[in-house]
Image: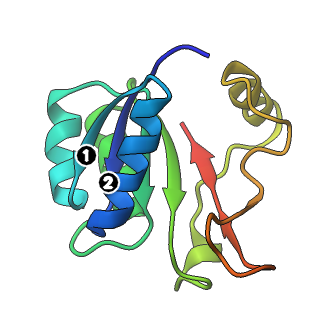
């Protein structure tokens, strides 16, 4: 797998640091952002292959961040992965960002991910039976 330029946006410092450390250990170049506003500033200055964003952040949450970068750079929207530490985040099921059909399969194959990527994924350290949803979109 090729090294990616990744932006991690999370208002929880420990989660942001964990993600940055894990992605950097895999050889990726990673920039941290402490919230959606900081992420927007970085996205205006730098091109990223992937954005890993908390779903819920003050002022600019993950979906708003995605919508804003689509507005600012419609031809250079990076892949997005939304994460949350909540078991049932308000509005989680209403997030309208899914890669479906042939486009989803292309995205999954291009990244070398398993065919069920983007489906429910067990959370690290979560109680048995608990899951987080990762939703990817370009």
Is residue 45 something that shows in the picture? yes
Tell me the quarter of the image containing the C terminus.
top right
Pointers 1 and 2 in contact (C-beta within 8 Å): yes
Q: Which mark is residue 17?
A: 2
Numbered disc 2: secondary structure? helix
- Residue 64 on image: x %, y %: 35, 61
Numbered disc 1: secondary structure? strand
Tell me the quarter of the image containing the N terminus.
top right
Residue 23 picture quarter = top left
Q: Which residue is at a point 35% across and 28% down the rendered structure image?
A: 48
Q: Which mark is residue 93?
A: none
- Residue 122 on image: x %, y %: 73, 64
- Residue 9 on image: x %, y %: 32, 54
Q: Which residue is at a point 51% across and 75% down the rendered structure image?
A: 85
Q: Furthest residue to the top?
A: 2
| Circle 1 crowding by C-alpha within 10 Å: few under 14, some 14–19, many from 20 | some
Residue 137 picture quarter = top right
Q: Which residue is at a point 46% across and 42% down the rendered structure image?
A: 22
Nearer to us in this view, 103 or 81: 81
Instruction: Give the number of callouts.
Output: 2
C-alpha separation, residue under disc 1 versus residue under disc 2: 8 Å
């Amino acid at each position: 797998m090729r090294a990616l330029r990744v932006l991690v946006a999370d208002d929880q410092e420990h989660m942001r640091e964990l993600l940055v450390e894990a992605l950097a250990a895999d050889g990726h170049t990673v920039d941290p952002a402490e919230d959606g506003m900081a992420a927007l500033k970085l996205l205006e200055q730098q091109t990223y292959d992937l954005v890993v964003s908390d779903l819920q952040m003050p002022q600019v949450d993950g979906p708003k961040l995605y919508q804003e970068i689509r507005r600012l750079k419609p031809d250079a929207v990076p892949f997005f992965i939304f994460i949350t530490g909540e078991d049932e985040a308000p509005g989680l099921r209403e997030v309208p960002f899914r890669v479906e059909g042939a486009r989803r399969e292309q995205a999954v194959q291009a990244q070398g991910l398993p065919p069920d990527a983007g489906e429910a994924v067990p959370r690290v350290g979560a109680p048995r039976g608990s899951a987080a949803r990762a939703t990817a979109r370009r």
